[in-house]
């Protein structure tokens, strides 16, 4: 898997209890963290004007450390995303970065406040996210080399994994947390 590509799904499930029990037995618990994700858009190129929103610039604070991430999502003809280009780096000085953002006229548009519990299971990193204002979600990210597999087959495998664990009803959206907070009436949900 290229370090600049991210293949993931975000879903709501009926029973996180069953997933947690499975992961505690068969996976490796990585940890629990509070993450504060602040999203920005440039004044000269408003990412939010395009539907579906494909670009996100995120400043993350987690455990007293900061990182900056730019994601450029790819959507199929039905508006579904399965992967993105992701460029991420650690930030040494939040103060200096905020000065740079101000100089470039980047404006903050939304903050995602979450508590994330993370496990590793086979090729997946599985996160249980509790999002302030949205509720509980599961994010499954593919962490192995892509090889000859198709992205669509990988995301179908993620859904199959959740079904095998018997999580109950699985509801998927293709827009992510910041979009759901900004434009809740535009979110389309699909039962898997």
Image (cartoon, rainbow, N blue to C red):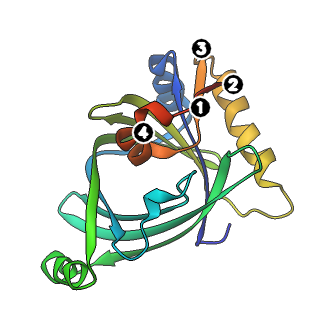
Asked if 14 appears above or below 113 in the picture, the reply is: above
> Earlier along the polypeptide chain: callout 1 or callout 2?
1
Chain-order first, disc 4 or disc 3: 3
Q: In the image, is residue 187 above or below residue 178?
A: above
Q: Which mark is residue 57?
A: none
Q: Is residue 139 left or right of residue 80?
A: left
Question: Which of 191/116 is in front?
Answer: 191
Find out whether the residues at labels 3 and 1 contact each other: C-beta distance under 8 Å. Answer: no
Gap between marks 2 and 4 measured at Cα = 19 Å
Q: Can residue 138 be seen in this view?
A: yes
Which one is earlier in the sequence, the residue at label 1 or at label 4?
1
The answer to the question of whether label 1 and label 2 lie on touching residues, with beta carbons closer than 8 A, is yes
Image location of residue 128, percent across then percent down:
42, 35
> Element at badge 1?
strand
Most extreme residue toward the right is 148
| Residue of label 4 | 180
Residue 20 placed where, x, y %? Answer: 46, 26
The residue where tag 1 is placed is: 172
Numbered badge on residue 192: 2
x, y percent for residue 80: 68, 45
* Tag shown at residue 168: 3
């Amino acid at each position: 898997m290229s370090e600049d590509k991210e293949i993931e799904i975000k879903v709501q499930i009926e029973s996180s209890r069953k997933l947690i029990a499975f992961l505690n037995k068969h996976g490796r618990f990585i940890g629990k963290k509070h993450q504060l994700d602040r999203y920005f858009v440039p004044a000269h190129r408003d990412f939010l004007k395009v539907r579906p929103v494909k670009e996100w610039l995120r400043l993350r604070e987690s455990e007293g450390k900061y990182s900056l991430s730019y994601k450029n999502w790819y959507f199929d003809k039905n508006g579904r995303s399965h992967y993105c280009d992701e460029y991420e780096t650690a930030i040494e000085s939040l103060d200096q970065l905020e000065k740079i953002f101000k100089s470039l006229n980047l404006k903050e548009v939304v903050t995602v406040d979450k508590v994330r519990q993370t496990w590793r299971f086979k090729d997946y990193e599985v996160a249980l996210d509790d999002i302030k204002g949205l509720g509980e979600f599961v994010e499954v990210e593919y962490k192995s080399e892509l090889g000859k597999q198709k992205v669509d087959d990988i995301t179908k495998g993620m859904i199959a994994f959740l079904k095998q664990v018997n999580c109950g009803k699985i509801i998927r959206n293709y827009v992510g947390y910041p979009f759901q907070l900004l434009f809740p009436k535009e979110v389309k949900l699909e039962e898997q």
